Image: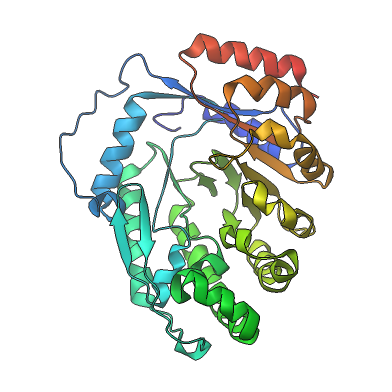
Amino acid sequence: MLTYKDDWEEAKKHYMAYWEKDYYRRCCLAITVPREKPKKNYVSDAQYTVEQLYTDPRALYDSMIRGCERTEFLCECIPGQMLNFGTAGECQYFGCKPNYTPGTIWFDPVLKEPDASLLHYNRSRFDEHKKIVSDLVSLVKNDYFVAMNDNCGIIDGLAHLRGTENLLVDMLYEPEFVLEAEKKIIDVWIETQNEYFEVIKENNFGGSSHSWMQLWSPGRHAQIQCDYSVMISPQMYEKFVLPELEMTSAALDRCTYHLDGVEQLRHLDIILSVKTIDNIQWTRVAGQPKTSASIEALKKIQKAGKGLVLIPDRDEIEFLMRNLSHKGLQLIVGGLKNKEEAEDLVRLAESLAH
């Protein structure tokens, strides 16, 4: 039993159906509302630096517990904390240094030449990260889930190492370097992600969780992506990114592709062709149309046999429930004021389930 998730066993039934591209009573709904009273009256007045909020297990635990104390995790919403080593943080295992800022981690390029022989795996840096995860799991016990990290996007990681503009030039003039470097990073990614899973699986009841996507899965599940792809053509995506998708997704029991905005739609057919990708998580990028405006693309994803993870605005939820199959559908819902509003939404979902 999770301290901050009283109805975990019920939520698990929904997730087991979700991964089978089915539904239990309705689509999955991950809903948060403010908690009326603190559950444990936990109070910590400790002050932490920005770096500690990324790397200190006690700081991570305290910050998460403060949030849990203020939040009700309803339906399929799960209390989970992602280990944030930076997006495509696996680049650190090849020499990138993190620049910690509130909200994100930045990296400066370190690979000055397009030479894959200069890429060396620094096991000691990974061991530092692994210890953070292990120590956090020991603190957390069963209060909440310790989720998989944000080490995702192999080409994204190579862009950190090489520099965005340099990598674009490399794709044109040094394609063999890109493919060789990509393979070296993938091999390390698979090894390190497997080790992370072994650390967190007991805390995750034998499975793995993803915090901001509000997903739990039996076995090894993680996010894959290529945010860099908004700068390249479908032909270059197929040449450089498709191998990454095939190798990384095949190394997992289940995986979810993070599709970052409508500019990635030109790559959708290639993404959908990868049989070992289970889900597409659709992100509406700031300044782009609402999620529901891409309803035909969302239907296409479902028709291809992939699940969906959506984070819609409140006023488009009913439209999505009516127009998308509830089989393998996860809607992440924020902005509700109380349990009564949540219960109304659950009843609506059950009435529209198909």
Percent of width and height locating residue 298: 75, 39
In this view of the protein, can residue 26 be seen by the observer?
Answer: no
Question: Which residue is at 77% across, 42% downward?
Answer: 297
In this view, the residue in front, 307 or 315, is 315
Question: Which residue is at 33% across, 64% downward?
Answer: 98
In this view of the protein, can residue 126 be seen by the observer?
Answer: yes
67 up-or-down from 252: above or below: above
Question: What color scheme is it?
Answer: rainbow
In this view, the residue in front, 341 or 132, is 341
Picture quarter with the C terminus = top right
Percent of width and height locating residue 122: 38, 78
94 up-or-down from 211: above or below: below
**Image quadrant assignment for residue 92:** bottom left
Q: Is residue 196 left or right of residue 267?
A: left
In this view, the residue in front, 256 or 234, is 234
Q: Is residue 132 left or right of residue 219?
A: left
Percent of width and height locating residue 173: 63, 85
Q: How many circles with numbers are drawn on the protein? A: 0
Q: Is residue 244 left or right of residue 202?
A: right
337 up-or-down from 133: above or below: above
Picture quarter with the N terminus = top left
In this view, the residue in front, 111 or 325, is 111
